[in-house]
Image: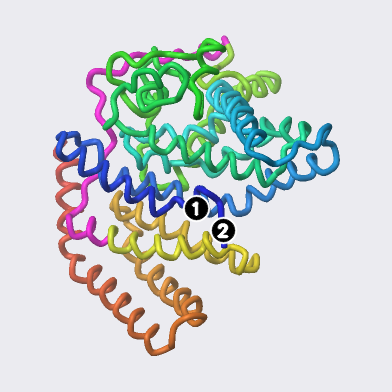
Amino acid sequence: MNLSPVIIAIPIYFILMGIELLVLRFQKNPSYRMNDAITNINLGVVSQVSGVFIKVLSIGVYSFLYERFAFFEVPNNIWTFFLLFFLYDFCYYWAHRKSHEINLFWGGHVVHHSSEEYNLSVALRQSSTQTVWTFFFYLPLAFLGFDPVFLVLVSGLNLLYQFWIHTEVIGKMGFLEKFMNTPSHHRVHHGRNPKYIDKNHGGTFIIFDKWFGTFQEEEEKPTYGITVPVNSWNPVWVNLAHYANMKEEMKQIPNWLDKIRYLFNKPGWLPEYLGGYRAVKDVDENYRKFDTTVPKALNFYVFYQYAILMGLTAYFLFNLENFDWMMKVGLSTLIIWSTVSFSGVFEQSRWYHIQEIVRIALFIVTAWFIALDFLPQNIIGIVLSMYGFSSYFWLWKNKTVVKNFQKSIHNNQQHA
């Protein structure tokens, strides 16, 4: 069983999000939107699933350096655990800071900032490529002799700590604000207001920002998101959008040396002959959050399908060691495909209907073979038949509603 603290805490994440949602309802704070929240969780799912393959690289390199080149042999005890926790957060500060200050690295981190809301679901909005650009920031810990198992545990706990600070429910926290990262400090970090950009990079502790000049107190309420909104619910595209934009901008740069500068300078940098650095501007007073609407029946449909997909995802992540590489690739592909298909429903893409028909069929076949290991065939047949019938009936029943809805949107766009 996968004993990563992040995986074990999945049920707690959803319980806390449910509590936050209720509190926000009482406060009349509309910071949860279904399409945004599901996209946040989708990106967390895609990150965890793709991380099955990418983390082999990062942990493998760390373990190799630890075994071959460690200067010391640090014992595993409670004191070295606390020391490693502090040193890990120091490394995290620099990895995080450079992810904001280097354009190429920003492509791996921008995903986490691209939600225009701020709630606990945003904590799950993680990139699938960030590890590629940041894992080497932690390699000095291998040379110092910290056990890779301890490192994985500490990194998981560091990420767990950062979950609860993604909320507007909690205000300022008095004495803790002086040295710990808090919801107030982290709200600043997610703000796209010029005064808040590239501030408060700490994970658990805020002291590194105060030491190295990147601290900003929360003053006016932040406007969340990024300066160039991604305007999509598709988790794969959200991961790739910045890289695609970089590719287009690099085509405009004729000089190879300037192309390299473009990769490693701050986001927004261009050579002087193309206009130079594009500074962050104040948020436009006419700014509106990206949003799409669908018939309520489809919102319920996505929620129903999503709950079932979460079951498959949890089974996959908790039982990784039981799967061969072919099975890992197959299940990962199905899970990621499902998240993309749900985004098609939210965006009313023309292909979503036929894709859902095919996806459900493949999902049923996959679930059948997985369930054979622990359920009788007749039970599996009944459950999957009910699932297939309810899914296809839902799509068929609401096909006319959706067509009329799409037609009305098209007419409104023409009128506008």
Q: In which quarter of the view is residue 36 placed?
A: top left
Q: At label 2, which amino acid type do we have?
A: Asn
Picture quarter with the C terminus: top left
Instruction: Give the magenta-colored segment's residue range.
Output: 272-301
The prevailing secondary structure element of the residues shown in magenta is loop
Relative height, residue 239 to residue 381 (above, below): above
Q: In which quarter of the view is residue 341 placed?
A: bottom left
Q: In which quarter of the view is residue 140 placed?
A: top right
Residue 104 visible in the current orientation: no
Which residue is found at the position 37% from the left and 34% from the top?
166
* Residue 409 image position (x, y, % from top left): 18, 47
* Residue 269 image position (x, y, % from top left): 54, 17
Image disc number at residue 7: 1
Q: Residues within 10 Å of mark 1 (few under 14, many from 20)?
A: some
* Residue 349 image position (x, y, % from top left): 32, 53
Query: On the rendered structure, is 240 left or right of 80?
Result: left
- Of the residues under marks 1 and 2, which one precedes in the sequence? 2
Which residue is found at the position 68% from the left and 50% from the top?
56
Relative height, residue 379 to residue 233 (above, below): below
Image disc number at residue 2: 2
In three-dimensional space, the C-alpha distance between marks 1 and 2, rounded to whole angstroms, equals: 7 Å
* Label pair 1/2, CB-CB below 8 angstroms: yes
Query: On the rendered structure, is 257 left or right of 224?
Result: right
